[in-house]
Amino acid sequence: MHMNRRAMIQSGATLSLMAPLMGFARKPADSPAAVTSNGPVRGYSAGGIAIFKGIRYGADTATTRFARPARPEPWTDVQSATSYGAACPQTGDREAMSEDCLFLNVWTPGLADGGKRPVMVYFHGGAYASGSGSDALYDGTNLATKGDVVVITVNHRLNAFGYVSLAKLNPDFPDSGNAGMWDLVLALEWVRDNAAAFGGDPSRVMVFGQSGGGAKIATLMAAPSAKGLFHSAATMSGQQVTACGPLNGKARAEAYLDQLSIGAADTNALKTLPADRLVEALAARDPVHPALGLYFGPVMDGRFLSCHPFWPDAPSQSTGLPMILGNTRDETRNLIGGREPDSFTLDWAHVPARLERHMRCDIDPHEVVARYREVYPHYTPTDVFFAATTAGRSWRGQVEEADARARENGPTWVYQMDLASPDDGGKWGAPHAIDIAHAFDNPGAEGSITGTGPMARRVSDELSRAFIALARSGDPNHAGLPDWHRHTLPARETMVFGETTRLVNDPRKAERKLFAKVPFTQWGT
């Protein structure tokens, strides 16, 4: 068992390991270096920010598939940290994918300077199935500069590599259903141990994430292993009210094995299959929701999770943590409209059938159409379709989480992103993921759909400063915003970021009440 590197240095046991670091102080400012708990790393500098990409926080997972991650073996030579590490294997094209994917990236205004800056740790989206921390939208330079904060993004295991639940088929894989979540715990332990070396304050760690990244945060809020590792949170269109149950997790594992032509009694064969084969098998249909592709996400396994994240109550271990919950006004215009472009040319006769396919809740679609036409008489069939699917499936989880926290008097602030994307004549409205660029103050970044006009830049400034304020003080209010009151019941105070940013009580009350008539069940559970 190896000793923690910092403890070894403090004990004087590894004086020789310091040799590679002796020249650090004489290195030019454009070649910053730091000593992590695993070993020394060297990054680069741009615009006054020290940047470290591809810092290893965990060992290669290829030889320990589906197990909890391990800390890496300490290193003594200075490791280059100037390019992003590999993403977890996944479908789609990425420049670098590998099971050796436990890397993180750091942007900081100062190194080991006693700055005690807030640390903002971002978890990427992608529905637990895809993505990485290296997207241009997540570049932390602007956020670190504006807020004098440390920004960190993280890679971790995804899809079957991170969430196939094999425990009920083989006791040798007890943590397989949440391996990707255990990765995030290890990453947060790294942040705790190394924040000071990068000018940060380990007692002021904020986690934030969009879509699947927000869902990961909601899950961590109920995970005993994550308690105390972060001190505030913000989720953007990312909720996890309920986790996958153990029986559904087993059924999905069996469907996955069947796609690989592996019997349920031969799960050990998964250890040696090429990673490409494991990715190809992700094309299986979901046994719980046969019309959809195979879902992998957190499992209530009694080890990482012993209860659902936000059902029937908000998790007591994190009730006191300050939290922002946000969603966009038009979540499904790209989530559905991007795949089904004829959704933009619907007539009234075809709306109910398409709603039935997409709302993911058991409610009469004719009743939904009638209610929307009553409340919003100016809406077109397309408007009704996207509004109802947004309210019925993409927004409801946020309502559940925010209300659950309000019932426990947890410090919670809610926002709605209304400012529309200018792309394609504005047809997308304010869709899923538009608020990422705003939160990072990156409206001009590659992949941003916010536009770079005056209103977009103002909203980016407003939202990014709110996130910085939450990280710094536990309260998102700042001089550039109207007073942002906490979310309470029944007022449901909501900051609406739009052409005019304003505080509104229960801004989609009629829609919320319509869908509150039916039980909420999170897809994938």
Image (spheres, grey):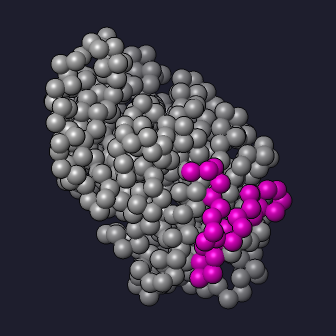
Please state, as top left, top right, bottom left or bottom right, where the N terminus lies in the image: top left
Q: Is residue 509 magenta?
A: no
Q: Which residues are magenta?
A: 472-501
Q: Image height check: is 228 above or below 324?
A: above
**Which residue is more in the foreground, 210 or 295?**
210
Residue 86 in view in this figure: no
Q: Image height check: is 202 above or below 107?
A: above
For image coordinates 78% across by 43% down, the residue present is: 408
Residue 231 in view in this figure: yes
Is 462 situated left or right of 132 in this image? right
Q: Position of residue 428 (x, y in %)?
A: 48, 78
Q: Position of residue 520 (x, y in %)?
A: 68, 51
Q: Position of residue 45 (x, y in %)?
A: 25, 55
Furthest toward the front, the residue is 26
For image coordinates 65% across by 42% down, the residue present is: 321
Q: Image height check: is 141 above or below 275?
A: below
**Which residue is more in the foreground, 288 or 470?**
470
Which secondary structure is most common in the magenta stretch?
A: loop
For image coordinates 71% across by 49% down, the residue present is: 411
